[in-house]
Image: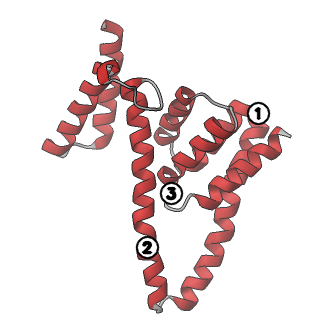
């Protein structure tokens, strides 16, 4: 039964995550944390971090990691297949349709209309992870006194370095990780 739930959950994620892995983050969070209590929010944040760092698509990596967490290796296979199956079918169909009807203005209008929705889904995932990092919980607390100052300083420093010197994001992430290890071990 757990395999069927994993498969169906990730079929839905694969079916509705238009825009890539970052757009799938809220859907994965809903399925793995909210709907099915497979993961805590902290485990979800850890899995998303690992999924972003490892090579490959974020959604597929997330499906694999969630599947392993829930039902071991067979769960990882089932979740991964569930995640990529809708994409394979949809992309094959869309490639055929786009090749056949690419000159129509309605096709260009649909593509232009999807862009804002993808941006909103990515922003939603980023805001959720920022709140979790700064406050240690999913929702904003009633007062802003419970903010994690170390996380805020690391975030601000990373953002400043990225904007001021246009540094390589990989180096900034590595530096933020090192700063986190050092600062959290000291304080």
Distance Cα–Cα, label 1 vs label 2: 38 Å
Q: Nearer the viewer's eye, disc 1 or disc 2?
A: 2
Whether residue 187 is situated above or below residue 43 in the rendered picture: above
Whether residue 75 is situated above or below residue 58 in the rendered picture: above
Viewer can see residue 56: no
Q: Residue tagged by mark 3?
A: 20
Residue 113 shows which numbered tag?
2
Q: Position of residue 60 (x, y in %)?
A: 60, 49
Q: Residue tagged by mark 1?
A: 71
SS at badge 2: helix
Q: Position of residue 57 (x, y in %)?
A: 53, 51
Circle 2 residues within 10 Å: few <14, some 14–19, many ≥20? few
Q: Are marks 2 and 3 in contact (CB under 8 Å)?
A: no
Q: Count the marks: how many?
A: 3
The residue positioned 38% from the left and 35% from the top of the image is 130
Distance Cα–Cα, label 3 vs label 1: 25 Å
Q: Position of residue 28 (x, y in %)?
A: 59, 45
* Colouring method of the image: secondary structure
Q: In the image shown, does 103 or 181 lie closer to the viewer?
A: 103
Whichever of callouts 2 and 3 sits on the residue coming sooner in the sequence is 3
Q: Are marks 1 and 2 in contact (CB under 8 Å)?
A: no
């Amino acid at each position: 039964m757990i395999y069927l739930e994993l498969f169906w959950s990730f079929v839905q994620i694969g079916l509705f995550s238009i825009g890539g892995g970052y757009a799938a983050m809220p859907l994965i969070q809903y399925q793995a944390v909210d709907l099915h209590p497979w993961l805590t929010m902290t485990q979800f944040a850890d899995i998303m971090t690992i999924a972003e760092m490892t090579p490959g698509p974020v959604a597929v990596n997330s499906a694999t990691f969630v599947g392993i967490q829930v039902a071991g290796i067979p769960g990882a296979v089932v979740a991964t297949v569930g995640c990529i199956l809708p994409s394979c079918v949809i992309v094959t169909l869309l490639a055929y349709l786009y090749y056949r009807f690419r000159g129509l203005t309605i096709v260009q209008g649909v593509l232009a209309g999807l862009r804002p929705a993808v941006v909103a889904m990515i922003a939603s995932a980023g805001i959720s992870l920022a709140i979790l990092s700064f406050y240690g919980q999913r929702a904003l607390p009633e007062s802003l006194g419970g903010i994690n100052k170390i996380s805020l300083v690391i975030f601000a420093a990373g953002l400043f370095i990225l904007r001021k010197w246009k540094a390589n994001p990989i180096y900034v992430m590595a530096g933020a990780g090192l700063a986190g290890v050092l600062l959290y071990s000291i304080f």
